[in-house]
Image (tube, grey):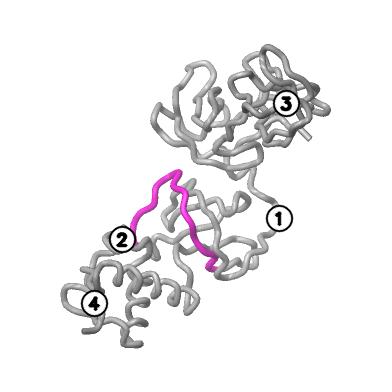
Amino acid sequence: MAEIGKLARLEVLKQAPQGLYLDGGPLGDILLPKAQVPDWATPGNALEVFVYCDSEDRPIATTRKPFAQSGQFASLEVISVNPKLGAFLDWGLDKDLLLPFREQKRRLRKGMRAVVYIYCDQVSQRVVASARIRRFLSPYKPNYQEGDAVDLIVFDETPLGYNAIVENAHAGLLYKGELSEPLEYGQCLSGFIKSVRPDGKIDLRRDATGYRRVLPLSEDIFDALSEAGGFLPFNDRSSPEAIREKFGISKKAFKQAIGSLYKQRRIEIKDDGISLPQ
């Protein structure tokens, strides 16, 4: 069934000079403009399309997929600012997404990023954005387990660390003292559940913990070492930034991984790096 602001698989009803008309159910027939029509599409076929409203507030379809749809959070770039309406964001479609001034927490300029929740305004039926993140977070207690891998979007910085949206539903905290480098507002990254407190608050970390983390990281580093011809200029003296850039992990995780490889006598640790045994 078609919903404004969401992807749907809709049946082609008929062809017209301006494009194809799709079965939008309660929304009526929805036009897929001619420029968007695949060569093979004919009446009776089903197409996956994104449904939104055109400049005249009529439902319209596109085969292009937005970066995020209604009901999701996203980090989007500001394309322009209208002094009367608000900021317009690039969400992957020809028609930019409006972030009204009343839904902003800070004034935005072209080129900046905005972390927003996308939704369909029930009055206007237009898809719009809001930067008032906490209003749209799930009210239900999270059901994560320690060590679960999660997708994150950083949306706020505090003296303790960085607040991040967890799996498009909850908020969690990454502690500055446990990070090898600063994070940026709007940064999308992967992380892990450190703990879920009795009050439902979530503590996060960048890397997995314990043996479950060390084993795959050890194999990744060993593979990289082999592909590099048996030597890599990284060891426990390397900077956290250099390790993160090369391997995508923290220095602590790197030291644990090469320590495991060294104990297995699969590598040698030297003053200038690590190498395969001679």
Residue 256 within the segment the image draws in magenta: no
Task: Kindly report which numbered mark, 1 or 2, lies closer to the viewer in this rendering.
Answer: 2
Q: Alpha carbon of mark 1 to alpha carbon of mark 4: how far? A: 50 Å
Q: Amino acid at mark 1?
A: Tyr
| Residue visible at 53% across and 68% down in the picture | 194
| Residue visible at 37% across and 61% down in the picture | 248
Q: Earlier in the sequence, mark 3 or mark 2?
A: 3
Q: Point out residue 112 in the picture as x, y percentages from the top left corner.
A: 40, 33
Q: Alpha carbon of mark 1 to alpha carbon of mark 3: how far? A: 44 Å
Residue picked out by circle 2 = 246
Residue picked out by circle 4 = 275
Q: Earlier in the sequence, mark 4 or mark 2?
A: 2
Please provide the residue range marked out in magenta: 180-194
Q: Earlier in the sequence, mark 3 or mark 4?
A: 3
Return the residue nearer the eye: 46 or 58: 46
Residue picked out by circle 1 = 140
Neighbours of disc 4 within 10 Å: few (<14), some (14-19), many (20+): many
Task: Kindly report which numbered mark, 3 or 4, lies closer to the viewer in this rendering.
Answer: 3
